[in-house]
Structures are given as C-alpha cells and as structure tokens.
Amino acid sequence: QIRHRSSCACRISIRLLHSLSMNFPLVSFVFLCSLIQTKSVSSRHVQDVIRAISPPGVGPRSEEFGPRRALGSTDIDGRGVQHTVSVCGPFMFLEDALLPRGKMPPLGKHPHAGLCTATILLRGDSIKHWDNIRDIEETAKSGGVLCLHSAGGIVHSEEAHDEDKDESSFTHILYVWFDPGIHRSQLMFPRIEIFEPCQLPMIQERDMRIRLFMGSYMGRTSPVSTYDADILVLDCHLPPGEEEHVILIPSRMDAAIVFIPRFGGSGYFGGSRTPISELETGMLSATGNFMSVRSASSLSLHFFLLAGKSFSLEERTFLLTGHSGAVLATSEEKARSLMEDFERDPDNFGNFFDEEAWHKKNEELDMSYPEESSPPSLTDIPDFPDPGGRLNVTYDDSE
C-alpha cells in the first residue's frame, strides 16, 4: 500500500511537471527549483466531505431557490447557523445563493465592520450597490465580483439590476467573507472594489480553465485586494472525461477547501480520489503543495478552491451578527461597541470622519472603477450546464 501511494504521487508529480513545462516554462522552472529546495512533493487529500445546509427561513417552497451555507458559524451570542465547518483559515463564511431574476436576498441596508465581503456574480442579474459613506450607486456586472472592506464601519445594500443580456432564468451568486488581518493593520476608510469578468485573470491549463478571483497563481495576480490575508480563490472548470488535472496549492497555506456550487457536477479530489458532488465541501489536509482532480461524470466539473494561511492564536477575532449584517473585531467589547454605534445612528454608522479627508483618502487608494468602454468579454464567461427544468418551482416573495 505504501509503494502504491508513492507510485501514485510520483506519477502525479511527473504529470504536474510535464503540464507546467508545456504551458508555463518559466513557472515550471521556478516550481522545480522550489521542489529541489524543499525536497518534497506531496498531495493534499480530502479529510472530510460536508453538505451545505439551508439557513433558517428557507421554506419548502424554495427547495431549489435560496441560500445554501457551506461555511459559517454562530457569533459570540450564539446567533447564526450551527455548521460542522465554522472557519477555514481567514475565511469565515461561504454561501451559494440561487434566486429568480430580479430578486436578491431580503437583507436591505445592513451594517458591516472589520471584515471583507466578496460577492461573486456567477450568472444572471448584475448588482446595484449603495453605501452610506459615499451615498452613490454603482453596478457590478454579471460574471464579475464586488469586494468590500468594511473597515471602521459601513452600511450598504445590494439590489438586482437586470440590464445584462443574460438569458438565464435565475441569478447565481457566491458570497465569501474573510478576515483581512484586523490584528495587523486597521483600515480606517471602507474600500469598495468592482471588477468586470475581463479584468480577472483567466488561466488555461490544457483543457482546464481557471479564473483567478483572489491571490496569485501560475505567475498571475488578481487585482482584488486581500490586504493582510494570505489567501487564494480559484474558480475552476474541467471538461468531462477521465483525464486527471493538478491544482497547485502553496504549502504555506495550511487551510484549504474545495466547494462545488449548484450545477457544478461532481468530481474526484486528492490523492485518495474522494468523490465530491454539487453543494458539498471537501476539507483538505493542512500539508501538501498540489491537489489532483478529475470529473466524475459525463458533465463538466465546476468547483472553487479556497486556500489561506491561518492567523496565529494570538490574533483571535470576535464576530457579532445583527440587523442582517455582521461586525468583526479584535475583542468582544469592541464588537459590541460597533453594533451599538450602528443601532444608535444607522444612517451615519462608520461616517465619523470629515468629507475632505474621505475624498483625499479615496485618491490615495485609487478608488477607480471600470470604464464603460471596457465591456466584459463574453468568451471569458464560463458556460453552465442547462438546469434541465429544475428551476420550475414556485417562489414565494414572503420567503
């Protein structure tokens, strides 16, 4: 058995280096040098597979529509969803949401502080974003991403905006929250970034397509800011077939998961070829520098890889939810104080600085947004399998 596992790892390593040398000669050289230096090539394996759950409030008539939580936990007061997977390194929340066109989660205007949120628009409506700091509306287009560093506090809302010529009958969104490293640096001013599909790096590795949402991969770097968090978010698409592919995972990142969203199919992951299906999360081992994967059916495979380096035990954070939002702080007292500030004056939460300083800081942070002259490339937007009539269900607005 040991000889068999060693042989499998050797074959995967040879395929990995061959694939790199054919597509990325320079990256292959750098990777080979790092292997010689570390003297180790090891595969990550799947330790556990966990099904995404429906948060409270999702009724039987929204069996297909609504949110499915893959990562999340309760706050310091016990509010939230009891989930097997509470955190993954800097990541603290991952949710797959499927909605009818023109609908969005009924969150309204809600507060955030401390944490970073990323709204990844997989398909359907664009999103119209508003916040109380700048009091302007901006649009994040389908296929792109909207990222918010809530800093000292912000109130924002996201509404469906159906200007896109997307003919799908539903809107598909992935929500990600992570700790930007609030123990290491404090961003005073909230920061909003909006990126179109054509601005996110697309990597083609043989017949596997990878969209880089956060971090660096294969010599490419995403424009999305991650601040003091060392994280990687990959959106991967594999064609059907038995050919095995390899995803590189930096060995320094001790926390990693794979998640298959709705309509993502199924696949075999890790050295032990563990099967993972739609709306399931695979918890990866803490060590290793690559992961093998292949499709498990006649359909293409679509999955996300989230990996990150955990903060130290001394950098513990405290999450407090309320009013459809959440605040993250370095102490319980600070978290409660932030929520009280919002409850005392919701309209001005986080707006404790003068306008001149805000605009000056905006210029320093390059708060520019995509110009209308740079439309997204439709060829960059992945094809999704037809739901096959699964979405012909009744949607109740009261849900």
Image: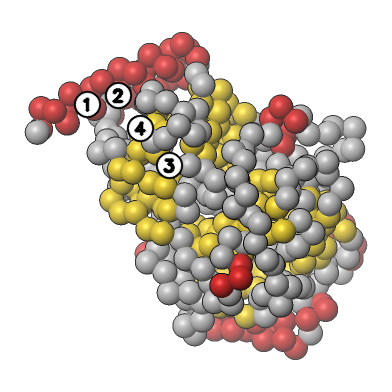
Q: In the image shown, does 225 or 353 lie closer to the viewer?
A: 225
Type of the residue with mark 3: Ser
Q: Are marks 2 and 1 in contact (CB under 8 Å)?
A: yes
* Residue under label 4: 292
- The CA span between labels 3 and 1 is 22 Å
Q: Are marks 4 and 2 in contact (CB under 8 Å)?
A: yes
Q: In the image shown, does 320 or 170 lie closer to the viewer?
A: 170
* Residue under label 1: 8
242 over 55 or under it: above or below? above
> Is 76 placed left or right of 123 in the picture?
left
* Residue under label 3: 266
Q: Residue at x 87, y 48 (%)?
A: 163
- The CA span between labels 3 and 2 is 20 Å
Image coordinates of residue 137 in percent, x first then y, are 87, 58
Image coordinates of residue 69 in percent, x first then y, are 51, 63
User: Would you call the spot at circle 2 few (<14 residues within 10 Å), some (14-19), or many (20 or more)?
Assistant: many
* Residue under label 2: 12
Type of the residue with mark 4: Ser
> Is 268 placed left or right of 102 in the picture?
left
Image coordinates of residue 18 in percent, x first then y, are 38, 14
Of pointers 1 and 4, the one earlier in the residue sequence = 1
Image coordinates of residue 127 in percent, x first then y, are 78, 54
User: Would you call the spot at circle 1 few (<14 residues within 10 Å), some (14-19), or many (20 or more)?
Assistant: some
Q: Are marks 4 and 3 in contact (CB under 8 Å)?
A: no
381 over 50 or under it: above or below? above
Type of the residue with mark 2: Ile
